[in-house]
Image: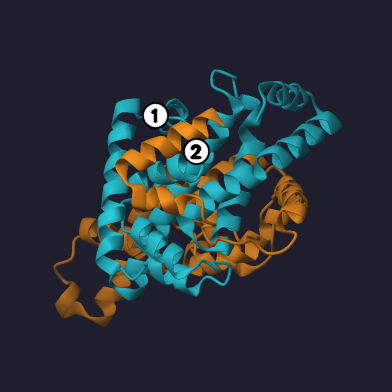
Chain colours: A orange, B cyan
Amino acid sequence: MERKTEILKELKELSPFIAEMKEKEDGFKVPEHYFDYLSGSVLEQVKLQRDPSFFISREKSFKWLDFFRRYQVSLGFTVVILIALIVVPFYRDHNEENLADISAEDAALYIANNLDDFETSLFIQEGLLEDIADSDFSNININELNDYLEESIDEIDEILLEQFL
Amino acid sequence: MKESADKEILVLLKKPGRDYEEGFRLLLRAYQEKLYWHIRRMVIDHEDANDVLQNVFLKVYRSIQQFEGKSKLYTWLYRIATNETLTFLKQKRKRSTVSIGKDEFDLVNTLKADSFFEGSEVMYKLQQAILQLPDKQRLVFNMRYHEEMSYREMSLILDTSVGALKASYHHAVRKIEEYIKKLV
């Protein structure tokens, strides 16, 4: 009570006008029984997060998560150089005039910056990735996965994320 | 929240199994409303507040074992809620700018559209005025004005000096008053 009085006194000194509004209801409401059900809802989310199988899906849309999880930057540059060796000859065959001067370095840089434009099947075909269908998920550490998801949350597509939730 | 109740919660949370679950349940019940309103007054929309609050509690569930008790449980929880809220607002603004090409994320519009806001015209103007403040200043204002926290508590949660908080709050009140007087 003492603090409430102190705060009101401070507010009256700053602005009697705003102080007058303080006693009125601010207008924010919640759905009926929201707080009654909230704990249950949170505990459900907790259970879902604890079950590793929740994160494992055979849907193709998971392939990008697994790709980035398993093949991070340390491997990336090697992959990029190898792909450059595939892509540059491909482009050269189709457009010699434009590609004649592209160095392998430039091609590698291009590929690195546009990785999303290349199909995963190309990587699999060249033996650079194993097919997700053959992957073994039994050793996924749920805490590592949670940490990864937290760090990468900005990069994960919203629609994909809604599927998880 | 009384310290003795917090101590009981922390003791349970240090134990495994059912005791841990019970401790977490007690924590939820003790803090859910306070944290909800802390978040809601910042994000405005009820659904957004619900999402942020659930994320807060998930984070708490995952990291409570690492809570060393150097600060009060209350302070620690509010700190997580505050950080999650500010992150949410930042991300929402960023997504809005990227998808539309300009900063269309406007909490005043969110307030207008919110079916769970039933304030009078005066309250609506007050909220409009509060929403003109930068996020951190708005946070300071809400914590003092609505949540009636002491400057000391706010200082521990926001990691800002008492002096700076007082200055921020006083300035916020003046800005709000000026803004409302222009609307009237």
Measured from the top left, where is residue B7 in percent x and y? 70, 21
**Mark 1 residue element:** loop
Q: Quadrant of residue B28?
A: top right
Q: Is residue A146 left or right of residue A125?
A: right
Q: Is residue B141 left or right of residue A131?
A: left
Q: Quadrant of residue A130?
A: bottom right
Residue drawn at point x = 57 percent, y = 23 percent: B72
Q: Is residue B181 above or below residue B33?
A: below
Whether residue A145 appears in this view of the structure is: no
Measured from the top left, where is residue B67 in percent x and y? 60, 25
Residue drawn at point x = 69 percent, y = 42 percent: A139
Label 1 amino acid?
Asp
* Cα–Cα span, label 2 and label 1: 18 Å
**Chain of residue at mark 1:** B
**Mark 2 residue element:** loop
Label 2 sits on residue? B148
Disc assigned to residue B159 = 1
Whether residue B96 appears in this view of the structure is: yes
Disc assigned to residue A31 = none
